[in-house]
Image (cartoon, helix red, strand yellow):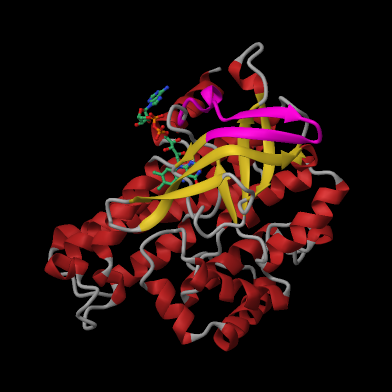
Amino acid sequence: MDIALEPDLHAFRDMVRAFLAEHLTEELRRAAERATSVFIDPAISLPWQRILHARGWTAPDWPERFGGPGWSEIERYVFAAECVAAGAPNLAPMGLKMVAPVIMHYGSPDQQAHYLPRILSGEDYWCQGFSEPGAGSDLGRLQLRAVRDGADYVLNGSKIWTTHAHFANRMFCLVRTSNEGKPQAGISFLLLDMQSPGIGVEPIRTLAGEHELNQVFFDDVRVPVANRLGEENDGWSVAKHLLTFERGGKYAPALMGQLRRLRGHDVPDPVIRARLGREAVTLRALQALEMKAMRGLGGGAALYASALKLLGTEAAQRIDTLACEIAGPAAWSEADGQTPASLAVAVPRYLNGRAATIYAGSNEIQRDLIARQILG
Ligand SMILES: Cc1cc2nc3c(=O)[nH]c(=O)nc-3n(C[C@H](O)[C@H](O)[C@H](O)COP(=O)(O)OP(=O)(O)OC[C@H]3O[C@@H](n4cnc5c(N)ncnc54)[C@H](O)[C@@H]3O)c2cc1C
């Protein structure tokens, strides 16, 4: 972590370091080092989640009453940075960082009591059912139909690009419950069980040859009305709230860790060394912005979320490119066992990282949102 800490944070940092030194196994650390995506395989992320859960540290950002540790913003930042520095795996964001905040905000007490502890422990693994073959950037046009039948909705249609749907036992899903008025006004937000009869999950292979994405088909799938979050036809408000959490976040600690590893290699080319130096400066600025956003300085959570998504994902792609250039022919040498992991997975990581400027709302759309919010 490169920020200067106030003296009273040293004890907190040391406590986190001691915990990581004791509990982060070499096996988990090595698996995380070879991961090519921010979405880490649950075979790696869930064991680490269970270790954190036993200490009460799974969800640093959650309020204490729902099971968060009650840390200040800066303590959360220190924790995230120390986890990265130690090489801990990412936890899956779909439950902890995306659907949990909206369950806290829009959920009934029963929904909160049911879902939140299962998200914390990792018992439930979530996927996000927003995009459809005909609705991505223009999400308001989604067509997955949900028709009321007694105490259930009956769902027909399809979701696409659904990350980790093949692992998930739960999906949060946007469905069309009305065709009246503006397209956004006929959408509802459902929490559903992936084991429900009528759900089919088909893999989509990425450019890097990995199975991370899926298309999910719904054929007369029954979902209890009680599983709706928020009011019928008000799912757009829930989704907008959720997207703020999906887009914002802490990019700088992980990128600083990646850059530090690259700068540890012998880099004879002065131009590449200069580009590494420039990224180090860029990341300092990103870190300052992230800390400002966390403290709510200047307001505008959605504006910060869009800006951080843009700056974080574009810096990540530049750093992935540098990794490939530094690695040269070793950039896809998974099998040789000689090349350091930060270089051996450079090409698959680069290919996977191309998606970062597309998912969570493409960067063109983020630029549009920023322009609209600033220019009115
Ligand atoms: C790796 C990956 C994981 C994903 N995971 C999930 C997931 O788990 N759940 C989920 O629901 N979705 C997921 N998505 C889908 C993602 O949210 C969409 O791909 C994204 O919103 C873009 O939609 P689209 O692919 O339909 O592209 P389109 O909307 O068709 O856009 C195509 C191009 O046109 C540009 N464009 C479109 N409209 C405008 C405009 N108004 N102004 C300027 N440019 C515009 C876009 O920026 C893009 O470059 C994932 C995508 C990827 C790549």
Q: Residue at x 60, y 40 (%)?
A: 244
Residue farthest toward the right in the current orientation of the protein = 109
Residue 43, position in %: x, y? 50, 72
Position of 31 with respect to 265 (left or right) is: right
- Quadrant containing ligand 1 reads top left
Position of 95 with respect to 271 (left or right) is: right
Tell which of 258 and 347 is nearer to you. Answer: 347
Q: Residue at x 43, y 32 (%)?
A: 133
Tell which of 151 and 214 is nearer to you. Answer: 151
Residue 82, position in %: x, y? 54, 72
Quadrant of the image containing the C terminus: top right
Q: Residue at x 22, y 77 (%)?
A: 335
Q: Residue at x 71, y 77 (%)?
A: 55
Q: Quadrant of residue 53?
A: bottom right
Position of 109 with respect to 356 (left or right) is: right
Residue farthest toward the bottom in the current orientation of the protein = 22
Residue 215 visible (yes or no): yes
Q: Which residues are magenta?
A: 136-157
Total labels: the figure holds 0
Residue 19, position in %: x, y? 62, 83
Residue 277 visible (yes or no): no
Tell which of 146 and 321 is nearer to you. Answer: 146
Residue 135 painted magenta: no
Q: Quadrant of residue 240?
A: top right
Q: Quadrant of residue 18?
A: bottom right
Residue 29, position in %: x, y? 45, 79
Tell which of 20 and 95 is nearer to you. Answer: 95
